[in-house]
Image (cartoon, helix red, strand yellow):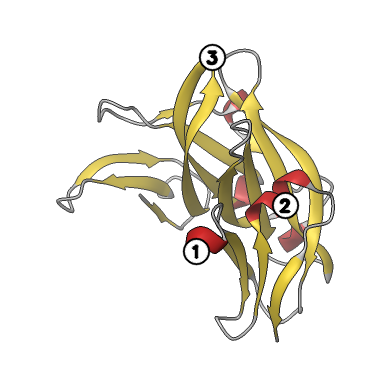
Amino acid sequence: MGTNRVKAPAGALVVFGLDGKIRQTISGLDRPNNVDVEYGLIVGGQPTDIAVLTERLKHRLRIFKISRDGGLLTDISSDGGAPVLEGETGERSEPMGIALYRRPRDGAVFAIISPKTGPRQGYLWEYRLEDDGAGRVKATQVRRFGGFSGTDGIEVVSAGLGPQFPHGLLVVMNAGPKNFLVYRWEEIADTGSPTLKVARR
């Protein structure tokens, strides 16, 4: 999956097959940015695989159900899109980076969001994704955390690093790989103050 990062109506989520051919184009998105995938979110009582993207100019997430039979993606966002970065203005209100995490002990799914710009502290926003009671998905803010050097935008990605880090890491990159922060995924989802494991500036 990839995004066409332009304003609506040309902004789109594009789904490719492993043969490189386009399988689906979901257009009309207003400056979509990053997209990530997670598995097994309980929606309507059923485990559901999802793709979630940031829709920058609408200040929201769009959540899509991935059909397990290879069919088309369908939008299951609550109210047409889950608002994020509420209370912010300008570039601070524009979501860009996204990383999803499924907590092993209970299957809860979280999204870490990075805006275009933000404060030096509390730059990253964490949301829990869950059924809204009507078979669609809402995003509930959990906390803000993380520092920002103020030099450039931040992207967030998840990475598994073998038995030492069985649930992976959250790697927050600022202006490239020479400037980054690393957190344990499980500490982000389970505590109010994630532990900084590595910092390089």
* Gap in angstroms between the C-alphas marked 2 and 3: 26 Å
| Among the two numbered marks 3 and 1 on one chain, the one whose residue lies closer to the N terminus | 3
Q: Nearer the viewer, mark 1 or mark 2?
A: 1
Which sits earlier in the primary sequence, circle 2 or circle 3?
3
The answer to which quarter of the image holds residue 132 is top right
How crowded pointer 1 is (Cα within 10 Å; few <14, some 14-19, many 20+) is rated as: few
**Extreme residue in the front direction:** 163
Please, what is the three-letter code of the amino acid marked with disc 3?
Gly
| Residue located beneath label 1 in the image | 161
Q: CA distance from mark 3 to mark 1?
A: 33 Å
In the structure shown, which secondary structural element does the residue marked by tag 3 occupy?
A: loop
Q: Position of residue 112 (x, y in %)?
A: 65, 51
**Can residue 158 be seen by looking at this rendering?**
no
Q: Residue at x 55, y 23 (%)?
A: 42
Q: Is residue 136 visible?
A: yes
Q: Position of residue 198 (x, y in %)?
A: 69, 76
Residue ID for mark 3: 44
The residue depicted at 58 percent of the width and 53 percent of the height is 98
Query: Disc 1 or 2, which lies upstream in sequence?
Result: 1
Inter-mark Cα distance, 1 to 2: 16 Å
Q: Position of residue 55 (x, y in %)?
A: 56, 47
Task: Kindly identify the residue that appears in the image at 54 percent across and 54 percent down.
Answer: 166
For label 2, the SS is helix
Per the image, the residue denoted by label 2 is 188
Please give left or right for residue 197 compared with residue 54 in the image.
right
Say which of 188 and 14 sits in front: 188
Contact (Cβ within 8 Å) of mark 2 with mark 3: no
